[in-house]
Amino acid sequence: MDGRTLGLSLFVVFLMAGSGATVFVLTESDNTDNEEPIQEIVEKEDENNPPKLVLSDSFKHLWNGNNATIEGFVYDENLESSNVFINILDDQINPVISYNISLDNSGLWTIETPLSDPGIWIIDAKAYDELGSQSNSVTSSIEIVKPVEPEANITFTWEEPAQNESIGTLRGVILHNYPQTCNLEYRPDGQNPAMFVTAEDISSIGLYALTIDTSTHNTDGLLFVTCGMFTISEVSVDVTLPMPPEPVGDLDGDAVLDDVDDCPSTPEGEPVYSTGCSDSETDDDDDGIMNDMDICPMTQLGKSVDNNGCSESQKDDDNDGLTNDLDLCPNTPENEAIDTQGCAESQKDDDSDGVSNNLDECPETPIGEQVNAVGCSDSQIGPQQPLKILALHGGGETANGLRNQQGMQHLMNTLSEFEFVFASTPESNNVWIKDPPGGKGEPTTDRNWADRSISYLDQIVEEQGPFYAILGYSQGAAMIPVYLANTDNTFNRVMMYNGYLPTTHEGLIDTINEVAPFTVPAMVFSGENDVNFKDLAPALAQKFSNSLDVHSQTADHHLPYNTDSKYNQIINWIRDGLN
């Protein structure tokens, strides 16, 4: 992700957390539990808050002929009924165009403006929801930067008239970034403009041809070219068009007599200057590259050049607007803003901690301190939470059974910075919550029905804690809200995979409801192929006020594998708590 996308994503997380909103995203998993789940879905009415509009401070485009685009993000409880109204004004504050954009449920929006020429425009935007609440007005700008256009360079060759003919052809190439903008004339010396010969068709790569009648046009003259898309430049070159060689005195046939010909061996057909030298024999800037091969014809004296005749002061290999000789960062990524030394934030590390500025969330790390992936040392982020995760197996499963699940192995390998402690239920038949005395069809109202498991978990936390997170699978997930409602122990994160509420134990549900909603950040995972459990996830999520609901389209009744499209979302959420 580019830097701006990452920043926007992080900001959206803060917006969502700040508004108290609950986000539901559902997933999948394998049925190994010996309990028969009972469905319970609780609907929760959302509170209406004004929409929040996120928009970059500016949109900068290098001119390429295409229309400029702008994009942003809106967060609201009901995005599909929200709109974004945008005014674009010119630099005189005159309206240019307005948009009223409907949103889909992603909140992301993009528009293509009709702006394509260089200039600067102002953006004024607001978001509205269906109840008339509106965001703060957000102001931004669009800038389309005109391209750099060096002066044109001209090459030419002369096809002299056939014997006893007077019509010859002057051909060559105009070297310019935008040859389609060029106009070329041959202006014979001493003749009026009516005799000028104009190139009718200049190709997209700058090829041209001029037909010259040597019986009516002076063969000494000037090639005159003007070029420029936005910056017009003019270049002229004196030429002498050689005619068929005289019987004597001009060995190379360039129409310059041998006694004044500085280049007596000019290749046949090449136009020459008054010195008798063609471009292939002339090096105007003395850089060792002849004019016909030199695309940088005004190199400073003494500068080293490449095979094209260009010195470092004439090149900008990374197109960042700073020539190579001044550019300390020669491989700047495309379109990234640079400083006066040609370096983008992604190429700098001001505090020398090994994390580039664009990724560094702690830009003034003391020298020598070790940092994490976002450039922060222990002294900058304070004491770290214990890196332990307490894991509860499913009903009828063992601690080793959970440990050996493929999805759990993937999770442990990815979160190598964490120690996983696998608890084993003290109850018989490997269950955390025993079935009611009369069977699953006769719910129990005993509030103390899970006390043995609760006491066991308290002992684990006391002896091996503290724990950064608690993780539960299947019945282990159902045990988590029971435990949280009946203990003083706390966790930074709660992960519940393929779980449900223990609704056949009405007494335990009463203890949960007396405390819920729990404020600890929670993640509720479900799988599309987990037909017996996937629909029970929402009711479990309702017991947490800050729940990330993850629904996999491929998982069954098991933890997601590292190939699951939702896997990295869960990993990032777990690690976010460390920050």
Image (spheres, rainbow, N blue to C red):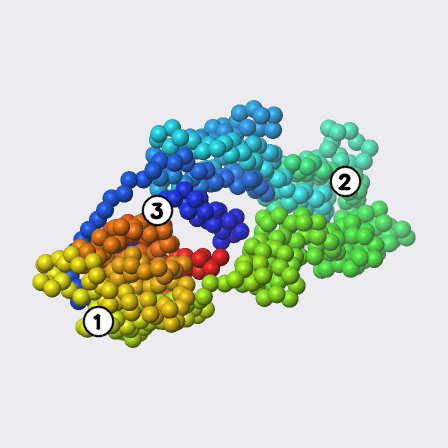
Residue farthest toward the right in the current orientation of the protein = 259
Determine the residue positioned at 24% across, 68% down. Answer: 452
Query: Which label number is shown at residue 153?
Result: none
**Is tag 1's residue or tag 2's residue first in the polypeptide sequence?**
2
Q: Name the residue under label 3.
A: 22
Residue farthest toward the top in the current orientation of the protein = 94
Query: x, y (%) of residue 188?
Result: 78, 36
Q: Do the residues labelled 1 and 2 touch (CB within 8 Å)?
A: no
Tag 1: Cα neighbours inside 10 Å, few (<14), some, or many (≥20)?
some
Q: In which quarter of the image is residue 195?
A: top right
Determine the residue positioned at 55% across, 40% down. Answer: 57
- Which one is in front, 30 or 198? 30
Query: x, y (%) of residue 494?
Result: 35, 59
Foreground disc of the pair 3, 1: 1
Query: x, y (%) of residue 142?
Result: 56, 36
Q: In which quarter of the image is residue 331?
A: bottom right
Foreground disc of the pair 2, 3: 3
Indicate left or right for 69 with 521 as reference.
right
Indicate left or right for 260 with 128 as reference.
right
Amino acid under label 3?
Answer: Thr
Q: Is mark 2 on a helix, strand or loop?
A: strand
Query: Which label number is shown at residue 427?
Result: 1
Determine the residue positioned at 47% across, 50% down. Answer: 10
* Residue 66 appears in the rendering: no
Q: Name the residue under label 2.
A: 236
* Residue 441 appears in the rendering: yes
The span from disc 3 to disc 1 (Cα, nearest Å) is 35 Å
Amino acid under label 2?
Answer: Ser
Q: Is mark 1 on a helix, strand or loop?
A: loop
Where is 35 relative to 163, above or below? Answer: below
Indicate left or right for 328 with 219 as reference.
left
Tag 2: Cα neighbours inside 10 Å, few (<14), some, or many (≥20)?
some
